[in-house]
Image (spheres, coloured by chain):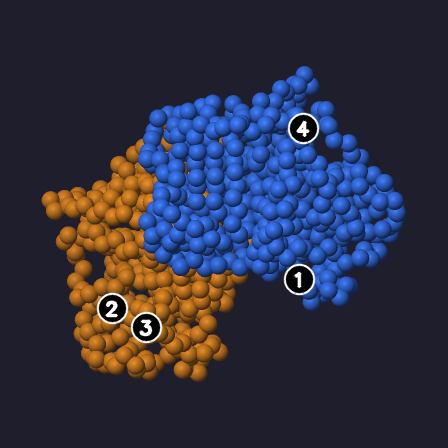
Chain colours: A orange, B blue
Amino acid sequence: MAAIVLWLVTVVVVAVHSASAGVIESEWEVGYKFWWPDCKEGIVMAINGKFPGPTINAVAGDTLIIHVTNKLSTEGVVIHWHGIRQIGTPWADGAAGVTQCAISPGETFTYSFTVDKAGTHFYHGHYGMQRSAGLYGMLIVRSPKERLRYDGEFNLLLSDWWHQSSHLQELLLSSSPMRWIGEPHSLLINGRGQSNCSQAAYFDKGGGGLKQCTFRENDQCAPETLRVEPNRVYRLRIASTTALASLNLAVEGHQLEVVEADGNYVAPFKVNDIDIYSGETYSVLLRTNSIPSTKHWISVGVRGRKPNTTQALTVLHYVDAPDAERPIHPPPVTPRWDDYDRSKSFSKKIFAAKGYPPPPEKSDDQLILLNTQNLIDNYTKWAINNVSLSVPATPYLGSIRYKLSAYDLKSPGKVLKGDYDIMKPPVNPNTTKGSGVYNFPSEIVVDVILQNANV
Amino acid sequence: MAAIVLWLVTVVVVAVHSASAGVIESEWEVGYKFWWPDCKEGIVMAINGKFPGPTINAVAGDTLIIHVTNKLSTEGVVIHWHGIRQIGTPWADGAAGVTQCAISPGETFTYSFTVDKAGTHFYHGHYGMQRSAGLYGMLIVRSPKERLRYDGEFNLLLSDWWHQSSHLQELLLSSSPMRWIGEPHSLLINGRGQSNCSQAAYFDKGGGGLKQCTFRENDQCAPETLRVEPNRVYRLRIASTTALASLNLAVEGHQLEVVEADGNYVAPFKVNDIDIYSGETYSVLLRTNSIPSTKHWISVGVRGRKPNTTQALTVLHYVDAPDAERPIHPPPVTPRWDDYDRSKSFSKKIFAAKGYPPPPEKSDDQLILLNTQNLIDNYTKWAINNVSLSVPATPYLGSIRYKLSAYDLKSPGKVLKGDYDIMKPPVNPNTTKGSGVYNFPSEIVVDVILQNANV
């Protein structure tokens, strides 16, 4: 899939009404725990013994003070607050090797930062494969003056899950030659999925040959259903923290009105399903119909790679529908994985809502970045402009602040030299590992063009 | 098993003849690697891509300079030089949380120390379960004026191995309630064992129902045989770095003359087999017989726990015996696991060789330590005098040196109060976690009595 993404680096200054700004303070302990995310026992990286981690419900302007204690035995840990701009608090961004050293076992690090702007966000581990191990949760920042009108809301945190431990996955992927981990064994909605059964097996084509799931109360893999009233509007806050899978979400019998993307309001548009890539968030408004006793499947399936993972399912449960009753229509069929025109069509519908400043008319500098998969000494590495990032042991931020120069001081090329056809990515025999950075003066506009040659 | 061990803490000053003292400098990279220790693929913690780690061959008085680079993704690492006294170099002892912080991923730490005294030693990881993951190797310090006479020598590094990853083992053992990992799947000699076959299956009783092993050249689980000449004396340097198993080693048709224990020469005595507990080392002299064409099994089996692990085997291969021929006698039978009288009888044969100073006639202080297994908040913890060690995040040595007081300043009791019968260990409902230390003035003699109530 050849996607050309234009990043226009802009700084949007938002006036924060902080009269009522509050403080949310929590103590988190991170540790491994046995868990049954998809009805099979595995190991998750839990926060305070729970998977996924706690949902943070904040209001724009609030200060979050999260004391993270590392209860792992030998591993460091960090938490990255995905989507939070960390204006004035770069040390709290939680990217190991970039903004901080990993928190050592037994140590506590306090993340303190302001969530300056309303939006649907999430947080996740940002060290090794700890995000894949399940270190994630939702981070909701509400507006004190919400412009959207709705009657209720639900969070849907989407992820992918493997039965191999994240340690094994990491070793497989980093072996020479690379050993592929395979497609995810399951997709999870709020940390819950099924791999050895299907909730929709009672339809001829719904179960993919799997047996019908039966859940006991409190099963960790039992879906959280969305209980709704008729004739209401609900906001679904959707985030994807997958390691591999690009996803598509649909609600049978209902349209979705996209109103927010990656923490920004967008000009509303209606679709039958949304594509969501790892790291993205959306809010969609769902208007319930007038019959109070129906149930409808919410499906999450794989896009962009030939799927070998069954859909994750949960239920939109109208208030009068009996608990024991099943949806009468099958789950939505996920659009064909390689229907790229459909993907582009969805992306091209997304425009900023009214009130945001327009993108800068011209840029002061430009980066053209080509993303390729390469072999370095027979190890499979991703590279940008022929450099595969080797995260330095000393974090960049401290290195710069204290003039330690503990990274490659030579900047990588701003443009990959030579002609290439993005549909036939160059072999790049000269790819190297490096830790160089691009340096820019402040207050300029840089036009970043990322070309994905992973056809 | 009730064992009473008396530790007489003494400082033996050895005059080092350092005229020819050398420097051994190495660069080590520690990382995970797929390996087949017992003919089944697992993951080992390798040094420079090898398991076990490299054997260090030094001469007393040499300085070792080992640059250890942590190539793990998220885990810290240290190397402890087991048996080395680190006189004047406590920072190089390599116990995480005690003498140093763990080396962070991507960082290099240089261990620099003198091996002041000849002896058979080994090194191993000393952080979390990294020793169980296979982070170990032999450390041989020869005497420039060896008092023993022998014609050749072999190293036998013994360990136990599980098919679960060390991460899984750790989580199982530290879960509430504790989930037992089971007996080892195999015993390894120099990192090589067999779990799904037996080399001695061709004897009626030798294989335990397993099929006969067949090895291909370069199989990582194929035994290293000991090739010997007739009518010679060989020194076997034996070390045990097991996580759980107490072991017994025997060589079919040969007596063993014990000459060294834990790096000290002992008054020689002959036995048919030796008991060896985790952390111990022995040297035994083996005199080969006069027939140049025989093969004999060397067996390593479990003692002290009801075994569910087949013997590790390798071969004493006389020079004229054809490669394809098998030993004609079955492997030695490991003594019954619960024959404690035999264990004590072996221990009581060990006396210092002539020339060592006698133990101090009296002690200035005394510690009576009772070792018990306890429940703390439904977690299974070992405790000494009712305190289960919680290793502080800041290492003791730095904490003391820089007056950080980053550990419990209250010393635990020198004697566990109350009457108890060591064969009926007390319930110890008041067991707590702690990091207190015993403080003693220098140059005194402390009589340490460790009572093991793990009957």
The residue under label 4 is: B354
x, y percent for residue B2: 51, 50
SS for dot 3: loop
User: Who is closer to the viewer here, B438 or A211?
Assistant: B438
Label 3 vs label 1: CA separation? 41 Å
Q: Amino acid at mark 3?
A: Glu
Judging from the image, mark 3 belongs to the subunit labelled A
The residue under label 2 is: A286
SS for dot 1: loop
The residue under label 3 is: A217
Q: Amino acid at mark 2?
A: Leu
Pick whichever of labels 3 and 2 is earlier in the sequence: 3
In this rendering, do the residues under marks 4 and 1 share a single chain?
yes
Q: Amino acid at mark 1?
A: Asn
Local packing at callout 4 (Cα closer than 10 Å; few below 14, some 14-19, many 20+) is few
Residue for point 71% across, 52% down: B299
Pick whichever of labels 4 and 1 is earlier in the sequence: 1
Task: Point out the frontmost of discs 3 and 1.
Answer: 1
Mark linked to residue B196: 1
Task: Point out the frontmost of discs 4 and 2.
Answer: 4
Task: Point out the frontmost of discs 4 and 3.
Answer: 4
User: Who is closer to the viewer here, B29 or B2?
Assistant: B2
SS for dot 2: strand
Local packing at callout 2 (Cα closer than 10 Å; few below 14, some 14-19, many 20+) is many
Judging from the image, mark 2 belongs to the subunit labelled A
Q: Amino acid at mark 4?
A: Lys
SS for dot 4: loop
